[in-house]
Amino acid sequence: MEAIGRGLIDHSLAKERWTHAAHFAAALWIILRRPDLSPSRDMPDIIRSYNEAVGGMNSDSAGYHETITQASLRAAAAFAAERPHMPLHLLCNALLASPLGRKDWLLAYWTRERLFSTEARRRWIEPDIAPLPFAP
């Protein structure tokens, strides 16, 4: 997890390793092991910078997505807060084995159209199906 988090930050993580699971691994590592960072504030630039460093782009249709990132950070932080004594690697495994481990978990809260809109990619938008149960 540390290698994923550090690789994201220093751009050494291979592009093919930046998976759904890696997003949560990096999020948990940053939330729990990097008190010098504010995840909700710093993760957007970390991801944008990484995307560009590995040849990707951040546009209205690809790359960084604000609503998905902020919702995922909220979910990871809430999941970790409910398990304060669990070792980090077990915490990540438990999160990925939970409904959050499904790539489509956000569609319980947002319609596909709203979640994948340009507006949601650019800025936080509230869910349109059900309130997100994780506090900001």
Image (cartoon, rainbow, N blue to C red):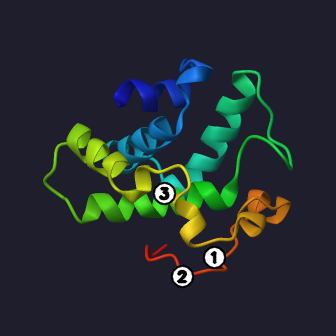
For disc 2, the marked residue is 131
Name the kind of residue labelled 2 in the image: Pro
Q: Is residue 95 above or below residue 105?
A: above
Residue 30, x across and y down, in percent: 41, 44
Q: Is residue 79 left or right of residue 21?
A: left
> Dot 2, crowdedness within 10 Å: few (<14), some or many (≥20)?
few
| Residue under the image location 43 percent in, 73 percent down | 134
For disc 1, the marked residue is 127
Q: Nearer the viewer, mark 3 or mark 2?
A: 2
- Can residue 79 be seen here? The reply is yes
Q: Is residue 94 left or right of residue 2?
A: left
Mark closer to the chain start, 3 or 2: 3
Q: Nearer the viewer, mark 3 or mark 1?
A: 1
Q: Quadrant of the N terminus?
A: top left
**Contact (CB < 8 A) between labels 3 and 1?**
no
Residue 71, x across and y down, in percent: 54, 63
Residue 90, x across and y down, in percent: 21, 42
